[in-house]
Image (cartoon, grey):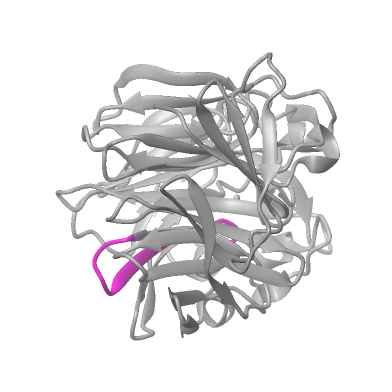
Amino acid sequence: MKTQFFTRNKKGHSLIGMLIILLMLAVSCEEPSEFIQSDDNNMSNKSFKQTNDQMVYEFEGSVFDIASTPDGGILVGVNNGASKRVDLIKNGSVQTMTTLDAATDIQGIASIGSGNIYVSTGGSDLAQNGELYKVTPSGGTMVADLAAFEYENDPDANYGTQWKDQLCEAIDGYSAGPQNNPYKVAAVSGNEFLIADAAGNTVLSAKSTGEIDWKAILTPPLDENGDYLIRWQTGAEGDIPCYVQPVPTSVAVANDGSVFVGELTGALADTDGLPIGRSRIWKIQPGANHVVCSEDSEDCEAIISGLTSIIDIEIGPDNLLYVVEFDQTSWLSLYIPNLTVGGSIKAYDLDGNLDRVVASGLEYPSAITFDNKGHLWLLENNSTSFTTGNNPTVRKIY
C-alpha cells in the first residue's frame, strides 16, 4: 500500500494513499503566543509556539519523520511543494541544514553523526522513484536506487511465498506491476541501512556503496480460518485473490542485532470494515536474512498483534520498544473531518510485553525520536491540514 500520508494511498498500501500511507497532544486550553522568524537562515516558514514553557515547532508542508543527532539536535525532513529540505532544531531555534534535489518527498531520516544523515524518498507508480540519499550540509547524493531494485525484483510477488500477484496493484489509482514506497529508515551501521518499503511489503537492506537486497517480506493479516485475508479478486475469470497488504512503515534495530518492524495494514474488503486491530510488530532474529515474516517463520515472529495503524517504532535509551499508533480508527480518519479519536505511544519490552502507555489522545502522531539526553520528541499532524487545519508540529513530550 502506498502510504501517502505517507505520500499516497495504495490499496491500503501506501507512512496516505490508503498509506496511503498513511502517517499533538492538544497543547493547551490557552491561546499560545506565536512568532515567526525570517532571516538569512531561511526561517520564513517555521513557526514557534510557546505554551506553558513548552516549545512547539510548526512547519508548513509535509513532515514524515524526525531523528536525533549525537549532539542533541532534532532533524526534521520538510517537504513544501518542490522544496525538500532538512531542518535542525537545536538550542531553541530552527535552521535549515540543507536542501535536497529529489523528485519525491523526504520520508525517513537516520542520523549517523552530526551533519551526516541518510534519508529515504517516496515511491511512485510502477516503482519509478524512491531512493536512499546521503545528506550533509553541502547537499545530498543518491547512494541507492531503491525504486530500480523493486522494479527488477518485486520481492513480495517473486520471492518467498510469492503471495502478491502484480495484477493486484491495479487498484486505488495504481498500475499492475511493481510498486514501492520507501518509508522509515534505520541505521544498522555507518554504511548499512534498513528501509521499510510500505508499498513493497518488504524490509530492504541498502549499503552506502549502492548494494541493495531484501531482508524480509511481510505477509498479509489472517482471517478467522488462518488464511490470508482477501480484499478483492482480479483476473479475467476473477479467480486471482488480492490480499490485504501488511504495509511496513517502520523499522528499529536492537543492540543485539534483532530487527523490529511495524506495519500499518492496508484497506480491507468493504464487508470487513476498517483495519482496526490488524497491525503487528515483527521481530527478526539477529543475522537472519531473506526472511518471510509469517505465523510459521522460525526467524521472524509477530511478538505484538491487535494494534491499529502503526506509523513508527523506536528503541528507547531504556531498551524498551516504543510503538506509535496513528489513530484508533486507522488511517481512514485522514479523510473524514472530525473522525480522529486519538493516537498513542506505548512502550513494550523486547519480547512484546506491554510496559506502559506513554501518551494517548494524540492527534495524528507520525514519528518519534529520543535526543541525547533521553528526552522523547514527537511529530504530529502530518499532511492533515485539509481535515484539521493544522500544520505538522514537533515538540518534546518529556
The question of residue 31 being in magenta is answered with no
The question of residue 196 being in magenta is answered with yes
Question: In the figure, residue 372 lies in which quadrant?
Answer: top left
- Of residues 264 and 46, the one nearer the viewer is 46
Count of labels in the image: 0
Question: In the figure, residue 264 lies in which quadrant?
Answer: top right
Question: In the figure, residue 100 lies in which quadrant?
Answer: bottom right
The residue located at (82%, 23%) in the rendering is: 338
**In the shown orientation, is residue 327 left or right of residue 371?**
right
- Of residues 172 and 27, the one nearer the viewer is 27
> Which residue is at the far left?
256
Instruction: Indicate the position of residue 190 as horizontal and vertical percent values.
Output: 25, 70
- Of residues 292 and 275, the one nearer the viewer is 275
The residue located at (64%, 63%) in the rendering is: 39
Quadrant that contains the C terminus:
top left
Instruction: Indicate the position of residue 384 as horizontal and vertical percent values.
Output: 75, 41
The answer to whether 264 is drawn above or below residue 6 in the figure is: above
**In the shown orientation, is residue 246 left or right of residue 213?**
right
The answer to whether 138 is drawn above or below residue 340 in the figure is: below
Quadrant that contains the N terminus:
bottom right
Q: Is residue 19 visible?
A: yes
Magenta-colored span: 187-199
The answer to whether 295 is drawn above or below residue 54 in the figure is: below
Instruction: Indicate the position of residue 333 as horizontal and vertical percent values.
Output: 75, 31
Q: Is residue 182 visible?
A: no
**In the shown orientation, is residue 256 left or right of residue 316?**
left
